[in-house]
Image (cartoon, rainbow, N blue to C red):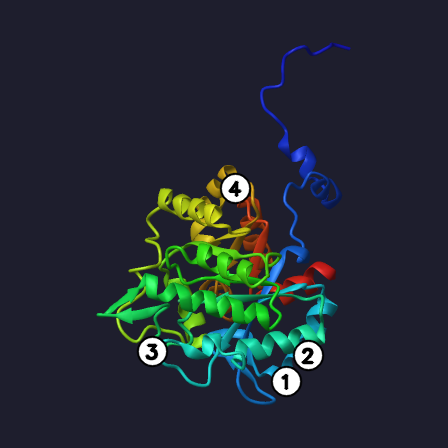
Amino acid sequence: MTVRTEVQAFRRFRRLRRTEALRSLVRETELSVAHLVYPLFVTHGQGLRQEIPSMPGQFRLSPDMLAQEAQELRALGIRAVLLFGIPARKDAEGSEAYDPQGIVQQAIRALKEADPELVVITDVCLCEYTSHGHCGVVRGGEVDNDRTLPLLARMALSHVEAGADMVAPSDMMDGRVAVIRRALDEAGYVHIPIMAYSAKTASAFYGPFREAAESAPQFGDRRGYQMDPANAREALREIEADVEEGADIVMVKPALSNLDIIALARQRFSLPIAAYNVSGEYAMVKAAARLGWLDERRITLEVLTAIRRAGADIIITYHAKEVARWLAG
Ligand code: PBG
């Protein structure tokens, strides 16, 4: 028998891919329901469960439907929701946003009553509540940053007074994290965290959401305050500023078109990073799956795993319920 002494010329990566047991042994990224946040849309009324046309499987629910929803989420192991409201009336200053009887405030109370352990996070932004559809107060045809800040602080405080566990400002005004932190601290809510939508780009991926939340701007667009998707260094400066102002979790949004930003932020910052797998990302998967062009389950798990691999700890996703079912079975 001859002994072969030459060095092997290539590496055999396939050795660890042969069986599912081997693959799972060396898998680097886990997707688990513990990291998912499920967005919920709430609307005034009774017994309402209106499907959102461009977001199949997502509904606008009236507050009386939320106890059942909370039960379903608990059974699926989904422990956190992000709330959006559709108000009864819109006005220039978005006053239902900070009304103790507002739709989100009612929804918070209903959810916390149904399941006190559910983590109820609220979106803090005026766009659903203003008649012009912008995320702040409009003066001279422009969104006025500093006049908007006190309203955001008031809105966040009213959510926390109603029982919210965390607030998530999404308006992209400068300084909002600082004013919200101060308002919460002064009212004794030092223990309530802020999840800041830090790097949020002006994106066409929000289209279906704006239909769901009836929040499309009535004139112009949001490019005067949301970030230019072309900028990565600026995204890091936005995140840095929110960390300095007191954010506990920073968010990158949309997720799929910003995986590089998530990865950069992961290297640069040590606090938890959330990624928002937004309405347009969901709608694309649903549309292609309906046409039979994609395998819905595989594509969804692939997308969410990629967002985790990029460095997100938390994923906010409309797919949360189906993923919980797939991961369980
Ligand atoms: C603003 C807000 C938006 C989304 C979350 N918060 C829309 C916008 O900025 O126009 C989008 C979420 C999604 O598309 O799923 N309140």
Residue hosting label 2: 67
Residue 217 quadrant: bottom left
Residue 164 quadrant: bottom right
Depth check: give the residue in front, 6 or 55: 55
- Give the CA distance from mark 3 to mark 4: 38 Å
**Image x and y of residue 235, in percent:** 39, 47
- State the SS at label 2: helix
Residue at 41 percent of width and 71 percent of height: 126
Residue 253 in view in this figure: no
- Give the CA distance from mark 1 to mark 4: 40 Å
Q: Are marks 1 and 3 in contact (CB under 8 Å)?
A: no
Q: Amino acid at mark 2?
A: Ala
- State the SS at label 3: loop
Q: Is residue 192 above or below residue 87?
A: above
Q: Amino acid at mark 3?
A: Ala
Q: Is residue 301 left or right of residue 169?
A: right
**Image x and y of residue 98, in percent:** 48, 75
